[in-house]
Image (tube, helix red, strand yellow):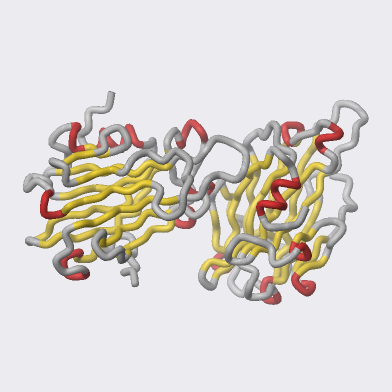
């Protein structure tokens, strides 16, 4: 049974799932049935220091940089259409191996060329992002992008963060104007 | 005042109009006709279950099957000229009489004999879909389809759907290049 998180709510991963070491952030959606450009959703993670910024570009894990944080965060690869059941893209996090300097991992979901293609999450069927205990497969939290981020093209889903020796997850669910480039720059990534 | 939706957006009709029992969904458009060839656009409704499919072909409501779900859905007919700013076709939905299995109603507009007449939505402008409270006639929500479609011959204008215990309306505006056939088949209708 998932903890149903309201925006801004947080849950202690350590308490909900004692001994939890591996977390999976799953992104899924349906292939487009109607006419027009495919819906290409992308999951990305930003490994942030106490200052809320990345230490370097290697801390931005996305479809062009599949591993970060000394291998503690791994992206399973770019799915450009939503083909396949279940999670179409995933970020796997091994909590004990996250570098000590990383205080927080921000997870975002963006629509590739969303503004140019004039696509928003509401146009995509069954788009969701979720946090799962990767050891048991139990879902901890889920966000319905189609329903609740309907007019957005980019969204900060949530943050996995350290708090007094525990790992916690906070649901953010905030839309972001402009797409992945501006979002990454916001975290200090040097976007070309 | 009516909520004006952008593509992909949704609104809770239950919140906008508490106690809502029945709605009239109006669809309208202008066609650019430069010579004498007629344009016959038809509105249809697909009554869908939680899996997004019709229960049977009877759940495909159109000009030759104007009543569905035991009368809870009524297509008011194909008898308007399409001139002026009003609704070209209207579907009345009694929300309180819809069977519990119906989770969503998808409103589509198709061009009759589009392939034969070589017509497509690129020749259609000022298309809109609106939801009006059947009790009193107030417009609750509206979506003006602003993007130019080009090669499509069938288009889903919007959806009326149940979310939790609310009725909501979502602006779709997405087309199907193959026309009514592929559209209907995607909903499980035997075409």
Q: Is residue A113 left or right of residue A136?
A: right
Q: Is residue B115 left or right of residue A145?
A: right
Vertical side of B20 occupied by A122: above or below: above
Residue B106 in view in this figure: yes
Residue B136 in view in this figure: no
Residue B130 rendering spot, x and y as whole percentages: 68, 54
Q: Nearer the viewer, residue A137 or B116?
A: A137
Residue A124 rendering spot, x and y as whole percentages: 51, 48
Q: Nearer the viewer, residue B105 or B52?
A: B52
Vertical side of B83 occupied by B129: above or below: below
Q: Quadrant of the N terminus of chain B?
A: bottom right
Q: Nearer the viewer, residue A25 or A118?
A: A25
Question: Residue at left 22%, top 39%?
Answer: A67
Vertical side of B32 occupied by B9: above or below: below
Residue A69 rendering spot, x and y as whole percentages: 15, 42
Q: Quadrant of residue B93?
A: bottom right
Question: Residue at left 73%, top 57%?
Answer: B189
Question: Residue at left 55%, top 35%?
Answer: A37
**Number of marks drawn:** 0
Residue B144 rendering spot, x and y as whole percentages: 65, 44
Q: Nearer the viewer, residue A68 or B120?
A: A68
The residue positioned farthest toward the top in the image shown = A192
């Amino acid at each position: 049974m998932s903890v149903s998180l309201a925006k801004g709510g947080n849950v202690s991963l350590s308490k909900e799932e004692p001994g939890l070491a591996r977390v999976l952030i799953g992104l899924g959606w349906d292939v487009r049935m109607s006419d027009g450009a495919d819906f290409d959703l992308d999951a990305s993670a930003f490994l942030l220091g106490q200052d809320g910024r990345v230490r370097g570009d290697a801390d931005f894990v996305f479809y062009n940089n599949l591993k970060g944080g000394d291998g503690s965060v791994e992206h399973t690869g770019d799915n450009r259409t939503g083909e396949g059941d279940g999670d179409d893209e995933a970020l796997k996090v091994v909590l004990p191996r996250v570098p000590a300097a990383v205080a927080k991992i921000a997870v975002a979901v963006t629509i590739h060329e969303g503004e140019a293609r004039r696509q928003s999450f509401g146009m995509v069927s069954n788009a969701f992002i979720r946090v799962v205990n990767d050891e048991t497969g139990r879902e901890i939290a889920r966000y319905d992008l189609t329903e609740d981020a309907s007019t957005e093209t980019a969204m900060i889903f949530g943050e996995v963060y350290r708090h007094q020796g525990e790992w916690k997850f906070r649901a953010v669910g905030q839309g972001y104007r402009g797409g992945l480039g501006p979002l990454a720059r916001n975290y200090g990534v040097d976007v070309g | 005042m009516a909520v004006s939706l952008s593509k992909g957006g949704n609104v809770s009709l239950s919140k906008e109009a508490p106690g809502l029992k029945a709605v009239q969904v109006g669809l309208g458009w202008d066609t650019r006709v430069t010579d004498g060839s007629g344009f016959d656009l038809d509105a249809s409704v697909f009554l869908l279950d939680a899996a997004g499919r019709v229960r049977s072909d009877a759940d495909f409501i159109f000009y030759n099957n104007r009543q569905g779900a035991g009368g809870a859905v009524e297509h008011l007919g194909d008898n308007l000229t399409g001139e002026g700013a009003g609704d070209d076709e209207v579907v009345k939905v009694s929300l309180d009489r819809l069977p519990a299995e119906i989770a969503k109603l998808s409103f589509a507009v198709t061009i009759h004999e589009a392939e034969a007449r070589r017509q497509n939505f690129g020749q259609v402008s000022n298309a809109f879909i609106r939801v009006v409270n059947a009790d009193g006639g107030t417009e609750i929500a509206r979506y003006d389809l602003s993007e130019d479609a080009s090669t499509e011959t069938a288009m889903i204008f919007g959806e009326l759907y149940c979310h939790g215990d609310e009725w909501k309306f979502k602006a779709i505006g997405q087309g199907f290049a193959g026309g009514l056939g592929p559209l209907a088949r995607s909903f499980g209708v035997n075409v």
